[in-house]
Image: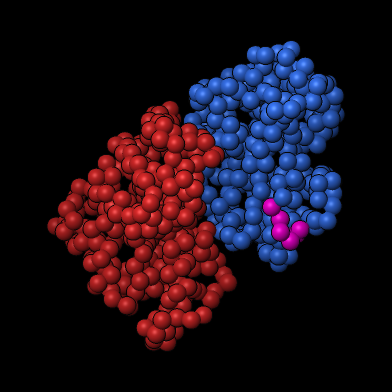
Chain colours: A red, B blue
């Protein structure tokens, strides 16, 4: 495979990097749906997941604070040893992706949400009529509009916000009619507009993907962060020559900044795979909630 | 649409049949993964599900007993009013499908498992190397071999039995390493044989479909009963002119022959959608376990 010179140098400089884990971080447990897809797409890679549950939700912090958190968490992950960093969180991607890329330079790649979903939606849409369902903060940020303008300038985006769906998914261990109603309300304008592709712009939503599919019908393509990012991560590893050579089942482990027992209990529902042990990492006290 | 004369007569005879529910029956909660797929594929249809939990598992009964059970349950479902019957159970399909078809004649169609999966596997395989993972009883019945000989005589089937996976899935509310190990053991011979399509021949297995996908890799197509049956049901409704005209969200309800609370609790995990109320139906006492 032909690689750009700087990447060849990087690989030549660090031949053991291929077997290092990929690091995924998020404000809490939502990003585990992203890890889930990565585990299915890249079964031979090792992963370490860091959930900043002590400072959840990130929507309550300024962009400056989020950049500070992202730099702190990244420092911890780099110290543990990692070959690629994935930001599995909308707010952190919007606030900190350029800062992290600048900070890490060519040493370690950084993949964030939003652009991978926009690219995948642009690929699968037939009519160019795409919808986004997301939290009010994500819709207000217009970050998906900006991403789609880059990757599919002819596409039309209909953005629909749901103020309660993420909370309902996190709180209800068994999905009830309230959850179905929240999905129905989000889908109504999408059906009216006749979109053919829907971006689930919140990492909590893949847990109710099938309720969305039932509401929208089989003819509508649903694109989620996890699915899009897992493809982007695979691509990034390939162009950097960093795919693991292992043929064994990859390992994965968890760190959280809040209560490990809460993380383990809530996380199992989001990961949909055995979670195992969770280690706690103390964040800088002044930022804790 | 052109319809065979006898079907046209049937539709003309019963114009309200279109809005009747589709009935799904199974020995327990496993068939709820079939109902799940039907609910996603056919969101405007009504369904009634009957789980014969009092006489679960069907593997412990003779073919004669299963035919008797199937006739009894079908009688109950026909009395409630239904336009199509789905047998979401391997053992019941193998024992009772021809008997039920003979018994119901042209009045009500019957769709069973096995043939839809075999047809779907034949459609998606590129190499013709297909595998079946199922319980020892299903593997021993060679029913998938017979079905594949009919629909894809050139295909080669590798059958792998798992004696513990269905029980582990039913018993473990959270999937742990035992579940992953059971899936790994089942996948090992499939990877060695280089099959490109795997039939999950037990209605419990879709709950661990993603663990299978992680073990097999994204390049292997996984076919499950629910997915195949939901397509077969849609096709059957179309050729019989029985698709609902409703544009509302379809309703679904549950009947079980054992403890409704057990059914509700276990069933929610298998349905992956809100379950709601469960009604109990008393079966003939002498057959109860």
Residue A258 in picture, x, y percent from top left: 28, 53
A230 up-or-down from A212: above or below: below
In the image: residue A40, left or right of residue B47:
left
In the image: residue A275, left or right of residue A245:
left
Residue A69 in picture, x, y percent from top left: 22, 61
Q: Quadrant of residue A184?
A: top left
B231 up-or-down from B199: above or below: above
Q: Quadrant of the C terminus of chain B?
A: top right
Q: Nearer the viewer, residue B255 or A224?
A: A224
Q: Quadrant of the N terminus of chain B?
A: top right
Q: Nearer the viewer, residue B227 or B159?
A: B227
Question: Which region of the structure is painted magenta?
Answer: B124-129
Q: Say whether residue A55 is magenta.
A: no
Residue B238 in picture, x, y percent from top left: 68, 29
Q: Residue at x 73, y 65 (%)?
A: B193
Q: Residue at x 52, y 58 (%)?
A: A40
B148 up-or-down from A211: above or below: below
């Amino acid at each position: 495979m032909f690689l750009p010179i700087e990447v060849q140098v990087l690989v030549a400089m660090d031949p053991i990097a291929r077997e290092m884990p990929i690091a995924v971080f998020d404000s809490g447990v939502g990003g585990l749906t992203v890890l889930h897809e990565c585990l299915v797409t890249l079964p031979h890679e090792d992963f370490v997941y860091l959930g900043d549950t002590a400072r959840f939700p990130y929507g309550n912090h300024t962009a400056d604070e989020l950049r500070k958190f992202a730099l702190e968490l990244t420092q911890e992950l780099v110290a543990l040893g990692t070959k690629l960093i994935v930001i599995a969180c909308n707010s952190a991607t919007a606030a900190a992706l350029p800062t992290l890329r600048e900070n890490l330079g060519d040493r370690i790649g950084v993949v964030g949400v939003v652009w991978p979903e926009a690219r995948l939606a642009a690929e699968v849409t037939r009519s160019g009529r795409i919808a986004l369902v997301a939290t009010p903060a994500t819709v207000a940020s217009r970050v998906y509009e900006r991403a789609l303008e880059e990757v599919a300038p002819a596409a039309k985006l209909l953005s629909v916000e749901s103020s309660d769906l993420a909370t309902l998914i996190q709180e209800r261990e068994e999905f009830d009619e309230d959850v179905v109603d929240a999905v129905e309300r989000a889908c109504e304008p999408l059906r009216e507009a006749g979109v053919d592709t829907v971006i689930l712009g919140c990492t909590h939503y893949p847990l109710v993907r099938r309720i969305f599919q039932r509401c929208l019908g089989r003819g509508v393509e649903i694109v989620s962060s996890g699915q899009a990012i897992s493809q982007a991560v695979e691509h990034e590893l390939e162009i950097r020559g960093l795919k693991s050579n292992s043929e064994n089942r990859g390992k994965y482990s968890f760190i959280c900044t809040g209560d490990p027992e809460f993380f383990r209990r809530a996380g199992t529902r989001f990961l949909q795979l055995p979670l195992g042990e969770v280690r706690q990492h103390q964040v800088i006290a002044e930022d804790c909630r």
